[in-house]
Image (cartoon, rainbow, N blue to C red):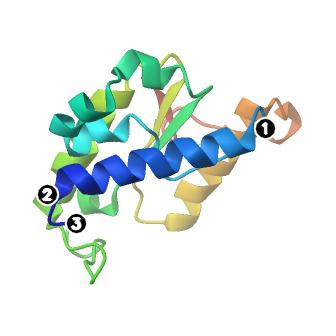
Amino acid sequence: MRSDKSAFHNIIYKQQTAREKALGNRSFITDRGTADIFAFHPEAVSEIGTTIAKEHKRYTAVIQLGSSASLGPDHYVGDNIRRETIEETLQIEKALRSVWSDHSAYHFIAARSDLGKKYAALRQLIFMLAGVTDRINISTDETSNE
């Protein structure tokens, strides 16, 4: 199925929107957003009939975690699922940033060699977005709101 990218991303889009619809008005965290299709396979967008602006409205906030590929080969390891090279991974990251960065509550957390620091920044950002201010201690080098 991954060899037919249009069909693959069409299925992902439909599954994602079905999961979101099932949640109703409840908050959720997901590893994919519906606008991802614009980064991965923009040709499939015409089949779905949507726009980036429409998809942005589906989300209160967007957090993108930077890939360890930006840290080089000592930190990025491919496998049977992650088959992309470092260069391909960084191109995907750039495309996703381009698609999501105009969202009014877009946040990017850069890759770090210390994975614990990256996830601490993520946790603190989630607390901030959820309004849990007594647990926030984010320094400017850990996250950026672009």
Between the C-alphas of marks 3 and 2, the distance is 16 Å
Q: Is residue 60 left or right of residue 43?
A: right
For residue 26, which numbered disc appears in the image? 1
Q: What amino acid is at disc 2?
A: Glu
Q: What residue is shown with label 2?
A: 88
Q: Position of residue 100 (x, y in %)?
A: 38, 29
Are the residues at dot 3 and dot 1 in contact (C-beta closer than 8 Å)? no
Q: What residue is at 20 percent from the left and 43 percent from the top?
A: 41
Are the residues at dot 2 and dot 1 in contact (C-beta closer than 8 Å)? no
Q: Is residue 5 left or right of residue 17?
A: left
Tag 3: Cα neighbours inside 10 Å, few (<14), some, or many (≥20)?
few
Q: What amino acid is at disc 1?
A: Arg
Q: Which label lies toward us, 2 or 1?
A: 1
* Secondary structure type for disc 3: loop
Q: What residue is shown with label 3?
A: 2
Tag 1: Cα neighbours inside 10 Å, few (<14), some, or many (≥20)?
few
Say whether disc 2 or disc 1 marks the residue closer to the N-terminus. 1
| 146 lies above or below 16 | above
* Secondary structure type for disc 1: loop
